Amino acid sequence: MVNPILLIAVPLGLAFALPLFGLLSKKLVKYIPVLALLFNLVVSLILLPRVLERPIQVFIGGFSPPFCINLVAGPVGIIFAALISLVGLLVSVYSIDYIREGPREKYHVLYLLLLTGATGVVLTGDIFNLFVFFEILCISSYALVAYPGDKPAIESAIKYLIQGAVGSSLALIGVGLLYGLFGTLNMADIAGRITSVKPISVFVPLALMITGFGVEAAIFPLNSWLPDAHSSAPSSISAILSGIAIEVGLYAVVRVTFTVFGASSIFMFLTFLGILTLLIGEMCAFSQTNIKRMLAYSSIGQIGLILFALTIATPYGVTGGLFQLISHTLAKALLFLSAGYMIYRAGSMDISTFKGMGKKMPLTSLAFTIGAFSLVGLPPFAGFPGKFLIVRAALAEETTLFTVLIGLALLGTVIEGAYFFRVVQIIYFKEGTAGRRKEAPLAALIPIFILMTLIIVIGIYPGLVTTLLNSAASELLNRFGYIRSVLG
Amino acid sequence: MRKIIGLILLIIIAVGLGLALVRIPFGTSKSRLGEYYIREGRKETGATNIVTSVVVNYRGFDTLGEVTILFTAALGVGAVLSIGRKRKNNIKHQPASLILRTGCRFLFPLILLVGAYIFIHGHLTPGGGFQGGAVVASAFLLIYLGCREIRISEKGTKAVESLAGLVFVAVGLVGLAVSGYFLFNFLPKGISGRLFSAGVIPVIYIAIGFKVGSELAGIIDALVEETE
Amino acid sequence: MSFLHNYIYYFGAFGLIFIGLYIILVKRNLIKIIIGLSILETGVNLFLVSIGYISSGTAPIFSRPEVEAARMVDPVPQALVLTAIVIGVAVLALALSLTIRVYRHFGTLNLRKIKEQRW
């Protein structure tokens, strides 16, 4: 039986060792993140069947909680860890050929550290530890956004950094308030004691932490950094930021709200915020001409939809939200990876230069199209079961309010379909400048192909994933089960 | 206009924080965690400095994360500042005066010694790896300011950084292999109050001291190169 | 009076936090904003440390055998602040290096003028 701590310790050790490998051989360096993430993927898949029944508790240092830091490898944690390592692995294979200029060795180390931070956030059971790993994620993403070194990249990075650092400081104030109130930092312990103080004292730390983690989760109105950052970063990093970083930020918000605070009164507020984020994201995406900015605003919209679904707080809702999260990660990664080489070929990020790309890069354009269709929610792609589950969850509430909200969400989907179809039309049905047919290199096509296959398979057999997600949903909704499994 | 919005936002936050703080008395009771660590710390970890035993042993995972953050920042600074920079060697510096140069050279090993003392004795006296590492880095800063021609080799700092980080992770993994718990304190705890006590804690703190010292020195080096 | 005496550390910490937030929200010069960020982080750290304080307490170090355990302050916030200070230094170093690059690209540190991208 494998210890889940290896999911964090092994990539961390390899990340520390990477510069030493770099001193030996410069060519070896690009393959180390691939190895580390492959290891993580294998370990999380091995652990997955075991944790569905009962979470594995890892006590670090040999003491017992709440006097030690603990990892809670439950269904939610391991599913997220598997998703992070899968997408991370595919994008690291893509990066082997995509990253050609600049201090490449530092890129690979920062990349591995970003994913290690993300894995640490989803597995930890201690609130200060959550903050520390969240900071690892954020700081490596600030540095990676600045990696291209040109004007837009540096501008986006500094703005992202300032907003992110203010958010983190607010979250830290929240952690301090929690420690002052309860005298412990263990999430299960705090959750058990949350009712012993007046709600007003608990409201402030909750608000601070939602705001602090919400900056990274790109909830409205904290998301002004996102379009700049995701569009100026290299495409592999945009895929990771849109596909993993904001999802992990949303996980932190959800974990704090659902498990630690159990604050059912705030769910309604977050539901409205989700719909608002969705509509604003999709409407802004509609008017973009820069393809990466369009995809970035689409990510904002999708996170709003996922937040809406999760805060319905019923098993249907949470399962639908998690399914949509997984399908968004896969589809958005596919979109950014294929767009990366299309931009390289067309020479610009403006959508109008993609005319005729369907003939020049047929496989890559097909991948982009599949990603777009999945995101909009067409069958037989993975986005369809996700949206279907969310609609069903909202209608199951049987209130006019939720019917109106889901109507607004579907309006958002229509807008999404409009701007994605526009791009697909330009790619396939407009005549472009003449050019030979030259595909993206093999290192890029392998991950693109794997993502396409996964999207289609999950779309046709959603049951494969929903069984896993049902356990995850019950972990999130069942606070007392969580507390019992940690503290006994 | 913007100032008014800013002020209103701040007043809202102030009122909220004030309400929250009424419930947290100042300077009175200790938390459960605090009581436990002070009571059991010396026995369970062997360190007389309880803050050290919390930082390295009870909450050692946080310290691992912290060391990683500093590593990330050093890499980030190196990556951001190295793009598009033309290597300019052989810059003629105006040499500093004899007194300055001699003074810096004299003080450098003494400051290193103080820093090393702080991080080696982290489990006995106030201080530890981070504090000692910062003092060590300030010694390098003194050299940069005083004797401007001297540069530390970038490969050297990278190698020390990586090795020290690996030592930390390796200690954790050995603990995992020996007892089934990551970062378990597997070396003998000895008599508390002696230098060779507290098991694995001095080893980790020495590694952290080297790491932080070389990282901060690397950051200073990258920033100084910028001003050339 | 004793109320003020007890809460002076909290007021000080929050004063720093608000000054820091005000600077970040209102000022336009990038260096000033980064200084504001540093002040904000210092205020947060001060707040964290003052949570653990025990009146007329002493450091939690058993330097001499006869130090009373009952009068020691809480060691946990001190450990938290150690980590938080290092995180603050890391963010500051990255921010300053980015500021150097911003100045090289844009020639100005005025945040209003650093607007390469349309919305």
Image: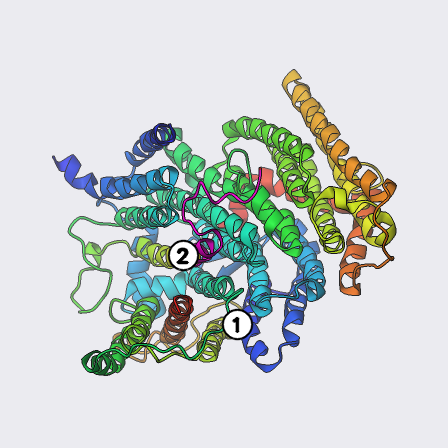
Image coordinates of residue B72 in percent, x first then y, are 49, 63
Magenta-span inclusion, residue A123: no
Magenta-span inclusion, residue C116: yes
Residue position marked by numbered label 1 in the rendering = B173
Tell me the tag on residue C16. none
Residue position marked by numbered label 2 in the rendering = C96
Q: Is A445 in front, or is B35?
A: A445
Q: Which amino acid does label 2 sit on?
A: Leu
Image coordinates of residue A61 in percent, x first then y, are 45, 65
Secondary structure beneath label 2: helix
The quadrant of the picture occupied by the N terminus of chain A is bottom right
Q: Which amino acid does label 1 sit on?
A: Leu
Mark 2 surroundings within 10 Å by alpha-carbon count, few (fewer than 14), some (14 through 19), many (20 or more) = some
Total marks drawn? 2
Mark 1 chain: B
Left or right, A276 with respect to B153, comes to right
